[in-house]
Amino acid sequence: MTIYSLYVYDRHCACVYYQDWHRSKRPKPAVEGGILNAVSSAVSPQIVVNTNAANSSAFSSPRNTLMSSTGIVVAIGEETASPVLQPASSEISRSSTLPFDEEAKLVYGVILSLRNMIKKISGRDEQFVSYRTSAYKLHIYETMSGYKFIMLSDPATDGLRFVLRQIYNGPFLEYVVRNPLVPMDSHEQGIDNDYFRASVDRVVRGLSVFT
């Protein structure tokens, strides 16, 4: 048994946080404008660097500079720095069939559809906490303020709603809600807090079902 990933959605249905651990297929990076900033560096839109413009600039290297007083070149003949190699497009396409922004929309859409179906079938406001497929089990915990914590795990895993509640009552309240530097409901920024990410990672890795 193991845990695959964690999503956090705000009251506006936007994914504000993502983290994964044992996914066999990583999602493609989201398209630019598809997700909020700082949701996760692993799924942020790829930034294309114009290497031609960088090489043509006289200030492309900290050593290729001029003395401020005389204008004489300090260092010349430096080897061109090796560009950062991005994964080939074929490798990215093999990792997943969907970019992350589409995946996040599908996850939220499934939650919304199942919750509405349960209410209509049961005829009362019944709580939706999880569902299971042959490949994974989805767990959900919704706060009174409208935030939804969603975790995907191995299908044989028992209910992890208590873990999501623990993440909300602990790291989320401590490093997000009570932190004046973290914008809430900004429509532009995700949960950009290293302490929150490290604390969530610690909680999840400490679970007996993690391995």
Image: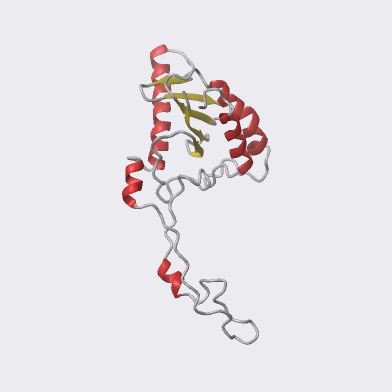
> In the depicted view, which residue is nearer to us: 191 or 65?
65
| Residue 63 quadrant | bottom right
The residue sitting at 54% across, 30% down in the picture is 146
Q: How is the image coloured?
A: secondary structure
Residue 183 lies, with reference to residue 162, above or below; the image says: below
Residue 76 lies, with reference to residue 206, above or below; the image says: below
Number of marks in the image? 0
Where is residue 123 shown, x and y percent of the image? 42, 12
Residue 108 lies, with reference to residue 158, above or below; the image says: below
> In the depicted view, which residue is nearer to us: 188 or 137?
137
Where is residue 84 shown, x and y percent of the image? 45, 59
Where is residue 121 shown, x and y percent of the image? 38, 14
> In the depicted view, which residue is nearer to us: 103 or 80?
80
| Residue 71 quadrant | bottom right
The residue sitting at 35% across, 52% down in the picture is 88
The residue sitting at 53% across, 24% down in the picture is 141
Where is residue 160 shown, x and y percent of the image? 52, 21
Residue 205 lies, with reference to residue 134, above or below; the image says: below
Tell me: 88 left or right of 69. left
The residue sitting at 52% across, 80% down in the picture is 76
